[in-house]
Image (spheres, rainbow, N blue to C red):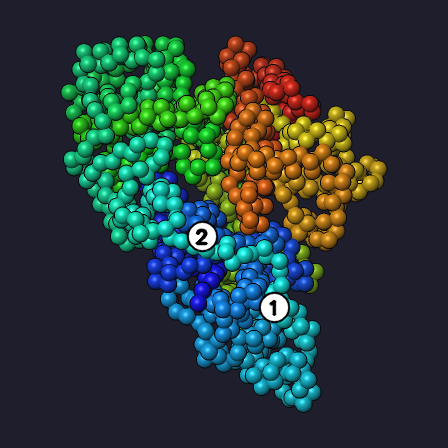
Amino acid sequence: MDRLWIVDGHAAFFRAYHAIRGGMTSPVTGEPTHLVYGFTGTLLNMIRTHQPTKLVVVIDAAGDTETFRTKLYPEYKANRDEAPEDFGPQVERCLELLRLMRIPVFGLEGVEADDTIASIITQCASDHADLAIRIASRDKDLTQLCSPQVDMFDAMKDALVTPSDVFKTEGVEPHMVGDILALMGDTADNIPGVPGIGPKTAAKLIIEHGDLDGLYEALPGLKGKKMQAIGEHRETTALARQLVDLKRDLDTGFALDDADFDPGQIDLEGLDGLCRQLGFNTYPRSFRELAGAEASTPENAVTEAAPVSRKRSAAPDPIDGGLFGSADTEAATTAPRASLGNYRCLCTAEEVKAYAQELLEAERFAFDTETTSLRAREAELVGLSFSTKAGEAVYIPVDSPDASHHLVLPEVLAILQPVFAKEGIRKVAHNLKYDLQILRGAGFDVVGPFGDTMISSYLLDSTRSSHGLDALSLGLLGMEMTPISALIGKGKSQIGFAEVPLDTAADYAAEDADATLRLDDLLQPKLISENLDRLAQEVELPLVEVLAEMEWNGIGVDLQELARQQVRLQDRIDEIATEVAAHAPHPFNPDSPKQLSAALFNAVDADPPGLGLKPIKKGKSGTPSTDLEVLEKLRDAPEVDTPIPALVIEYRQLTKLVGTYLASLPEHVCEATGRIHASFHQAVASTGRLSSSDPNLQNIPIRTDVGREIRRAFVADEGNLLVTADYSQIELRILAHLSGDPALREAFELGADIHTAVASQTFDVAPDAVDDTQRSTAKMINFGIVYGITAFGLSRRLNHAISPGEAQQVIDDYKARFVGIDQFLAACVQEARDTGYVRTILGRRRPIEGIDQRNPMLRQRAERYAINTVVQGSAADLIKVAMVDVHRRLPEAFPEARLLLQIHDELVLECPSGQAEALRDFVVQAMAGAMPDLEVPITAGSSIGATWIEAK
């Protein structure tokens, strides 16, 4: 008998996420991997043991859309906390794994996985009477589906659950489960039940009376408080019964042949590459054994280039047999290793001069720097490595434990300066921005043209999980690089690179230059063939120099102002704690969600006593949640007369400002400059936008007055002023240009308030008759349309000021009024479907995986990515062009001015006070005219001030 295996995907993901504690990260990409590791192991074990021939994974695709349950009961699952931040990216990796294993993934947009599973089972059981069906899940809701044809499987326990098992454990038949849940409720899904009715009572009543209808028929003759409660909550029970009932008649589009699974067809090369990226050393063998292939790593595992492999003892495997590796934290600096090429260490003036001449005669060379710190402004140069030919590289040290045996920095600088200053030689690095700052700090003047293999990789595939040198070398070249920890160790025993023995350091450093050259050999021709070379040469590589300059400049910080704000906020925090204590039913720590929950929701006569408020939703631990949404609802509820929710909201806001910014920002101030030198990243966001870290200045709060005050601590030097310029509604203007929609274009050309203009069009009222709700709705649609906003999502974002039905009507009216936008969105999706990717205004490309998926959830998500990338990516193109233009013209126009920051659509500069107004006009003009061919007016607001808050 054939058996169809249906895996409850998200249930499996959550179990795997919580099964492994302590966290795992890939030694190659740095991403979290414990969910993927656990899910992969469970899946492999299930397949090995049970050898399914028909297998499908069903995932929850309800997402940010209204379901029939939320229509019936808006509080359905409102108690669920947001998934952890590292959950979603790992699910994406699991979906990638399933694709490579050729296991179909299925989900319906706006439909929960349980309903999809129920409908697939109902259809297959009807069409294939001789088909056995097994659900891989332990979800109690799915026990309703158990029958002689359907059973369940707990993969973690390797245990079956049959209808007889349901009867043994629960005392009921599977078809009774829904009635029992309706009586007792389901706290996990926030489904209300009858007070005082637990699982045993519910089961007993349903067994005695057959079902809910039988119970209610007999109710007049039943006595007791519980029976009275059942009668009083009949409407609640009827609602709960609808909520727990599984949809079994959905048109899923599923065909049994879709689930055919053949281990011999899995993509071993792709799985090998995925495992290398994730640092899974044991799974490749498992996959090969599963596929019936040789259990050794294939020689042709990397398709882009022939792999290079070597044995090494300097770096232990990151995962060795079990979940975590047992890598020694001592610095492994003396272990022998085999080089990947012909590497030399140049220690004499004659050797360095001879090699410098070789570099001067080359058309291109790759280089890398070894330093004392990852913070470029504070790092000192330890050595340089170069390569002009794949497989050959040299290392030139300037510091080491053997300093007497090699040249020092002034000598090396004198010999190599002509090399870096010579125009016409293409100088290639990996993460060029860092190396340019290191060379600048060491006294080198460096001129282009440049190459950056990290940028090349990013332009070719911005969705790649890592563009780091180790990850690319492994994934594209088959080169397993030596991790830095193998040289300097970890933890307390970590040493500096200058302390690594010279022969070991030389091999490591030369390897980096060699790998960079090989990557350039591979990636540069692809940039040209994919028509991305112009974007690289005219925008991205010049932008590397802009960002290097920005990071080098940094921004001034008033530490005394930070301290003053911290004292002021801490005083208010202490006041709030006193006020909370005065209104609390018992003393508690406001930093503790658990203690706060007890104070708010415990009964008045409980131990400890509480205020007896009605819980709104429950957290992961099962206790009533006290997250921001709950506290805001309690604060705004007229029947709640305690000030504690409002006080705790303010308390949390202030403690976060103190901990995240006021107390931590001073740690990022460079001692040598007294400024903060944040890092800006151009190879992270798939859309092309820049991101920031160390610290993340793009996250400095601006939504509240007290948060905005933090900007007061960012200051210009004495005698200088800060100048800011910020694009106005740039994504909407880009949308108007790209879509060609006449109504949207006209609104911008007239200079009208865009949200009022759109509301006027959408609601068919005069502009001066638009009310606040209509303008807010239009604003939400304007900013949400390129993100695929749904009626349910719009309603929720407007705090349910309009119903989902009304929201859908508004969206429909919007699309009817702005037909060009709807046509443009469809064109973006069609481009992705035709080519597999979308392009921005400047030709930036983002692959869109899943655009042709039969799975509606994956397909619609891909469609949203396609639309969002074109608009947001084109806006990113615009400000990058403006930054490059400003940076290029600034030295001549305003030689004393400096570009300091880029924050989303805003630029921050500094200049002498007397030049501020002229600089402001210059920057605004440059930003407005960065792309003169745009058919919509581009505007930028600007301000001047001694502090960032004054210049905003």
Q: Position of residue 820 (x, y in %)?
A: 72, 34
Name the side, left or right, on which 587 lies relative to 47: right
Above/below status of 662 relative to 877: below
Q: Amino acid at mark 2?
A: Ile
Q: Position of residue 193 (x, y in %)?
A: 61, 72
Residue 232: quarter of image: bottom right
x 30%, y 32%: residue: 306
Could you say which is closer to the camera, residue 910 or residue 168?
168
x 39%, y 48%: residue: 266
Name the side, left or right, on which 248 lies relative to 428: right
Q: Amino acid at mark 1?
A: Asp
- The residue under label 1 is 245
**Mark 2 or 1, which is nearer the eye?**
2
Q: Position of residue 341 (x, y in %)?
A: 22, 27
Q: Position of residue 901 (x, y in %)?
A: 51, 27
Above/below status of 126 relative to 942: below
Counting residues from the start of the chain, the first of labels 2 and 1 encountered is 2
Could you say which is closer to the camera, residue 296 or residue 471?
296
Which part of the image, by quadrant, shows the C terminus? top right
Could you say which is closer to the camera, residue 851 or residue 704?
851
Residue 533 visible from this viewpoint: yes
Graded by Cα atoms within 10 Å as few (under 14), some (14 to 19) or many (20 or more), the crowding at tag 2 reads: many
- The residue under label 2 is 103
